[in-house]
Amino acid sequence: MSSTPTSRSADLQLLRDEGYNVEIRTDPAYLLVHDVPYVDAHRQVRRGVLVSTLALSGDETVAPDTHVAMFVGEVPCDQHGAPLTKIINATGHQVLAEGLEIDHTFSSKPPEGYPDYHAKVTAYVAMLEGPAQSLEPGATARTFPLQLDEDDTSPFQYLDTATSRVGIGQATDKLRGWKVGIVGLGGTGGYVLDSLAKTPVSEIHLYDADRMHQHSAFRAPGAVPRERLNTLKVDYFADLYGEMHKGIIRHPFFIDEDNVGKLGDLDFVFVCVDDADARRLIVDRLEVDDVPFIDVGMGVEVSNGALTGILRTTTSTPEDRATARRSLPLVKADVDNDYVHNIQVADLNMLNAALAIGRWKRHVGFYADFEGEHDSSYTIDGNRLMNEGGRSAV
């Protein structure tokens, strides 16, 4: 595999985005496309490897230096088993480089040549794939294989093909490099992590000393395996999302007066606790350390056999501390909040987290932010979302 990211070459990246099993080899440079369907002489659909020389200028491709392609496999045929003589230029085993041997060369040159490698690959694939699809509908070279991330600086275990596929790289770059903390993984915090793990933030710090009890599993993202019940939440979530994101860091303790200062090293914090005293301790310190944060919470009660309540998302930045603080429940309420008693409301946790992640993404500029609200409340029974503060209130 090449250490040169294909994202630097638009044609190679497009092939990957479209699902082709692309491999880049260097010294010498070759482009290999695996899993290309074709028909053999017995009219059986098989899979081969399309090979092309790779012309580079530095780390980026230039126009192909030849229209000729090569192939690893049996003699490719049409749907009747007749060789594709229109494109087969020569047949014979040939060693191109150590570990790279071919069986055939192809020649099919359009009048204007091939402008890039995407055009060249897709043209030859279509010539091979067409007969295969006539015998096996659905046969395709677009297999969407797992693509490991070869960039050591990437926060992901494998390539983020979703971002490049839809062309939102410029917006996604605004999420890079952040060190983010999640305090509390009881319910909403787990869903915050689920979203954060799919962003290119550099570090995600998890703070919680609780264990994944059976009731906790019913408001956590995903399906908790039985053997992971009663393990520390930070361990369970770090193991789970560590399969995707490299920067998840576990802190198996509750935030108290002795360790609250550790939050000051972060760029942003999601506060997902349901205890007013703990919230006040965390908020006071984050304000002193000029760390922006989002505090989430919900008040849920049972009324006539149904649940009612409000989800709250409060954003506090160094520029707007006072107004945000007025929305934060920093003193224990006199009324009962049935949520504290473990009512299973996974969908509310999920929604609360989605509102918080959306607000953070507006804060960093990934999403447009026309309101700049510091507080939003979602009312369950009326399906209403209300904002307070921000530019619209000036």
Image (cartoon, rainbow, N blue to C red):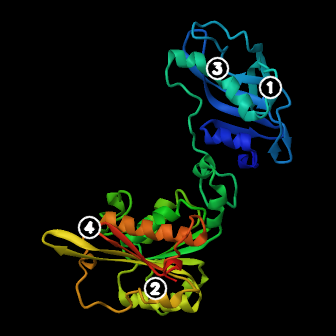
Give the alpha-carbon distance from disc 2 to disc 4, as whole Å: 25 Å
Kind of residue sitting beneath label 3 = Leu
Numbered mark located on residue 128 in the image: 3
The residue indicated by pointer 1 is 95
Give the alpha-carbon distance from disc 4 to disc 3, as whole Å: 54 Å
Residue appearing at x 60%, y 68% in the figure: 365
Q: Earlier in the sequence, mark 2 or mark 4?
A: 2
Kind of residue sitting beneath label 1 = Val
Camera-side mark, 1 or 2: 2
Kind of residue sitting beneath label 4 = Gln
Give the alpha-carbon distance from disc 1 to disc 2, as whole Å: 62 Å
The residue indicated by pointer 2 is 255
Q: Earlier in the sequence, mark 3 or mark 2?
A: 3
The one of 205 and 234 positioned closer to us in this rendering? 205
Within-10-Å neighbours for mark 2: few <14, some 14–19, many 20+: many
Q: From what the image shows, is residue 13 above or below residue 259?
A: above
The residue indicated by pointer 4 is 344
- Secondary structure of the residue carrying tag 2 is loop
Within-10-Å neighbours for mark 4: few <14, some 14–19, many 20+: some
Q: Position of residue 387 (x, y in %)?
A: 42, 76
